[in-house]
Image (cartoon, rainbow, N blue to C red):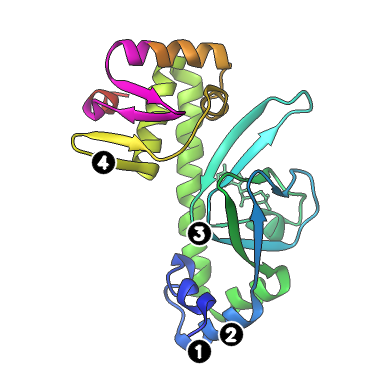
């Protein structure tokens, strides 16, 4: 069985699709790899390609002209992105950048993707479920930005990262992602200086420790409060 078929069988949006169709999907997707820090596409680009991430992580963000950045999401293997420009025929709504040593994606063009959805409505249902999950996360971000101070936002961002990227080490949790204070500030929606102060406070309280740009949550229960 081809590599791509083995992978596509595990992609959640294809979970209701039979073996024959999966083989066809494997035939119409193209595998591409992108090196670390490369930009898969920029916000504002025209695009009619869907990306399914096979390996590596991809950061989705909005970047202002003066270089300020807001991270919207970190895509994990098995997730898809680039669907918005396909569905509404608008330019790319955000920039996609490779975080790890490399990212491998499968690409699908608009025509093939739309045909697949029509042939397999279960794919549409899976995509709707995922888009709903994304709206919930955005709503949470809006609520946090409106009502939480930076210290609370840093704590709740770390809690969310621990859920997705966390590796348990005894009672502690290591966030398996190298992050500068600026990276975290871009996720939280604040300045690097303010986030550094919040991190220092969390370290002083013994709730987290930081070494080699990696954060360990020493007291996961304390973060649950946020
Ligand atoms: P598109 O607009 O084509 O290009 C950028 C992609 O980033 C977009 O499709 C989505 O796949 C993804 N994206 C944009 N905003 C978010 C968000 N808030 N959460 C998760 N993914 C997003």
Residue 79: x and y in percent read 51, 57
Q: Secondary structure at mark 4?
A: strand
Q: CA distance from mark 2 to mark 1?
A: 6 Å
Q: Residue at x 65, y 61 (%)?
A: 33
Choose the circle earlier in sequence order: 4 or 1. Answer: 1
Mark 2 or mark 4, whichever is nearer to me: 4
Looking at this view, name the residue that lies furthest to the front.
212
Q: Dividing the image into 4 quarters, which one contains the C terminus?
A: top left
Choose the circle earlier in sequence order: 3 or 2. Answer: 2
Q: Which residue is mark 4?
A: 168
Q: Secondary structure at mark 3?
A: helix
Residue 216 falls within the magenta-colored stretch: yes
Q: Residue at x 45, y 18 (%)?
A: 147
In the image, the segment drawn in magenta is 201-221
Q: CA distance from mark 2 to mark 4?
A: 39 Å
Left or right, residue 214 beside residue 55:
left
Query: CB of residue at label 3: within 8 Å of ligand 1?
Result: no
Residue 71: x and y in percent read 58, 34
Left or right, residue 126 beside residue 65:
left
Q: Which mark is residue 128?
A: 3
């Amino acid at each position: 069985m081809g590599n791509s078929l083995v992978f596509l069988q595990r992609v959640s949006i294809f979970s209701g699709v039979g073996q024959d169709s999966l083989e066809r999907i494997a035939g119409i997707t193209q595998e591409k790899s992108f090196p670390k820090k490369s930009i898969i596409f920029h916000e504002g680009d025209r695009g009619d390609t869907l990306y399914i991430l096979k390996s590596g992580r991809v950061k989705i963000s909005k970047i202002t002209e003066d270089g300020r950045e807001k991270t919207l999401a970190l895509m994990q293997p098995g997730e898809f992105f680039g669907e918005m420009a396909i569905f509404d025929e608008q330019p790319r709504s955000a920039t996609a950048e490779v975080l790890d040593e490399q990212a491998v994606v499968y690409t699908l063009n608009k025509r093939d993707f739309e045909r697949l959805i029509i042939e397999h409505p279960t794919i549409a249902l899976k995509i709707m479920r995922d888009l709903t999950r994304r709206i919930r996360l955005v709503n949470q971000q809006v609520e946090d930005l409106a009502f939480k101070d930076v210290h609370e936002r840093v704590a709740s961002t770390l809690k969310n990262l621990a859920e997705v990227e966390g590796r348990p080490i005894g009672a502690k949790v290591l966030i398996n992602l190298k992050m500068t204070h600026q990276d975290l500030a871009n996720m939280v929606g604040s300045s690097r200086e303010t986030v550094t102060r919040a991190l220092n406070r969390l370290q002083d309280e013994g709730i987290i420790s930081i070494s080699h740009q990696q954060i360990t949550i020493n007291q996961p229960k304390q973060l649950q409060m946020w």
